Structures are given as structure tokens and as C-alpha cells.
Image (cartoon, rainbow, N blue to C red):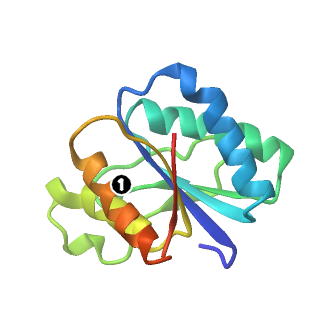
Amino acid sequence: MNDGKTCFFIGNRHTPSDIRAQLAETVEKHITEYGVTTFTVGHYGGFDSMAREVLREAKTRHEYIKLYLLAPYALTQKRDIPEGFNGSFYPEGLEKVPLRYAIVQANRYMVQNSDYLITYCHHIGNTRNIVEYAQRREKKGLIRVTLL
């Protein structure tokens, strides 16, 4: 996707709208202080929707950033690319994964191949499992995790 620093988002489907300002501040900090130029976000649930909105707004101030939609079902489902986004991203090797595991495997791939993760995770489930995996990678210096 890009040679610059990358950031991925993952969060709970039911994310309260009152974290939006904190999310916007966090995205701005990742751009201006950490040098992130490429962001990838999914398209399921409240957190992803909020992140897409915040990213589109950030791109109006930082036109050089690249925005990608994670597309774990790209081989079977057509998704429109949100306005302001540069395209979609289908992780390498995902075509070998059964469909019911595609999103989990795609999220895991993104954690393995991103410099930063921004997350809102307050429930048990696959999101929590991916965040805990990212936190174990963070202890090894492989990713930096921001919990909202």
C-alpha cells in the first residue's frame, strides 16, 4: 500500500458517539506526531463508521494521507469505496481462509502489518482477542496500540 507509517482501526460494533472527539484528536496526533500516512479501516459497525468519518475530515487538512477500506470479503461481496478513500485492501492469502474466518484473519493480518493500531474495545469477543494479540506484539516493539 505505502512505504510510510501505517495505522489500522478496530473497535466494537456499538461504540458510543461521545468518543468521536477523542478519536479525531488521536488521528490528528498519529498524522502530525507519528508520521502516519496510510490508514486502513473496516466497514462493519459503529466504530468503523466513526473512524471513516474522522479520516475523511482529516484528509481535508492533510491531503497526502492515504485511506483504504479493509475488504475481507472482496472475492464474494462488492463494496463501494467511501468518498475520500483511495481504494480497498484485500490481505494477501485471505482467499485460502474459510469465509466465516475472513474478517478475523484480515484483522490479524492488519495487526501484523501495521505500525499503529487505534482501538475502542470494551467487550469480550473477536475484537478483544485481536486487541490482546496486538498488545502482545506491542510488548515486542512490533506495533503501538492506542486504546480509546
Amino acid on which disc 1 is placed: Val
> What residue sits right under mark 1 in the picture?
131
Q: Residue 13, position in %: x, y?
A: 35, 32
Position of 94 with respect to 140 (left or right) is left
The residue positioned 64% from the left and 50% from the top of the image is: 85
Residue 87 appears anywhere in the view:
yes
- Residue 65 location in percent, x, y? 74, 58
The answer to which of 143 and 61 lies nearer the viewer is 143
Check disc 1: other Cα within 10 Å, few if <14, some if 14-19, many if 20+: many
Q: Farthest residue in the front direction?
A: 139
Residue 147's place in the image compared with 104, above or below, is above
The local secondary structure at tag 1 comes to helix
Residue 73 seen anywhere in this rendered image of the structure: no
- Residue 117, position in %: x, y? 51, 57
Say which of 89 and 138 sits in front.
138
> Which picture quadrant has residue 46?
top left
Q: Which residue is painted at 27% across and 35% down in the image? A: 123
Residue 73, position as x, y percentages in the image: 31, 55
